[in-house]
Image: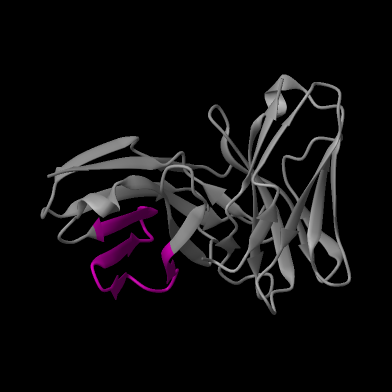
Amino acid sequence: GEDVEQSLFLSVREGDSSVINCTYTDSSSTYLYWYKQEPGAGLQLLTYIFSNMDMKQDQRLTVLLNKKDKHLSLRIADTQTGDSAIYFCAETGNQAGTALIFGKGTTLSVSS
Amino acid sequence: DSGVTQTPKHLITATGQRVTLRCSPRSGDLSVYWYQQSLDQGLQFLIQYYNGEERAKGNILERFSAQQFPDLHSELNLSSLELGDSALYFCASSAGTGDEQYFGPGTRLTVT
């Protein structure tokens, strides 16, 4: 079945780069997404990448997609304490229309 | 602010009761999705409506139902509530059926 896997925790120091990794199973996913959830808040769409792209850059965020290995990563440059949150990777599986299938989320902790 | 609104923000009710959660999509969006977020199951897709019609169903219990009204707002009805239904319920909207989804702030349901 469809599944999205992420590591659960990542701890970095302020100013360093953070890399959050994700693997997915549905090779037919057209788009892959990264969402951010701060404590007590909803999910904020950070960025997404079309499946025929290898890389997308958006300010401090860089998304890399390796379709062959079904591996997606999100790099945050110059990580700040305000980046501390849970980051979710999501794919559009084909089981139920265009519903998103989410990973369990990676908790990013940024220390000063 | 994503432009998606959900009410109420918090809801506390007893087992066996019925509640209605409301969602207003972003202006111009035709699709509404409902997701449940719980500690043990993570983020799970429940159901999608597109322009008033049910488009896709995910892991939605038979005790749960939803609808989308002509003004495109949606309601999620949860009945015969059980302790295990305590969760955050998110609504998301998108322009069409394959576009990026924007999430509301969620409704936190506590069943006692």
Residue A73: in magenta span? yes
Does the magenta stretch mainly form a helix, a strand or a loop?
A: strand
Q: Residue at x 79, y 23 (%)?
A: B14
Q: Which residues are magenta?
A: A46-75
Location of residue A88 in the rendering, given as x and y in whole percent from the top left corner: 43, 49
User: What x and y, as percent, mark residue A86?
Assistant: 38, 44
Residue B39 part of the magenta segment = no
Closest to the observer: B110 or B103? B110
Image position of A1 (left or right of B52): left
Q: Quadrant of the N terminus of chain A?
A: top right
Q: Nearer the viewer, residue B79 or B46?
A: B79
Above or below B107: residue B97? below
Image-quadrant location for residue B15: top right
Q: In the current view of this chain or complex, which residue is farthest to the bottom?
A: B28
User: Which quadrant is the C terminus of chain A positioned in?
Assistant: top left
Say which of B53 and B23 sits in front.
B23
- Total marks placed: 0
Quadrant position of residue B37:
top right
Q: How is the image coloured?
A: one colour
Residue B84, position in %: x, y? Answer: 69, 23
Residue at 77 percent across and 56 percent down: it is B56
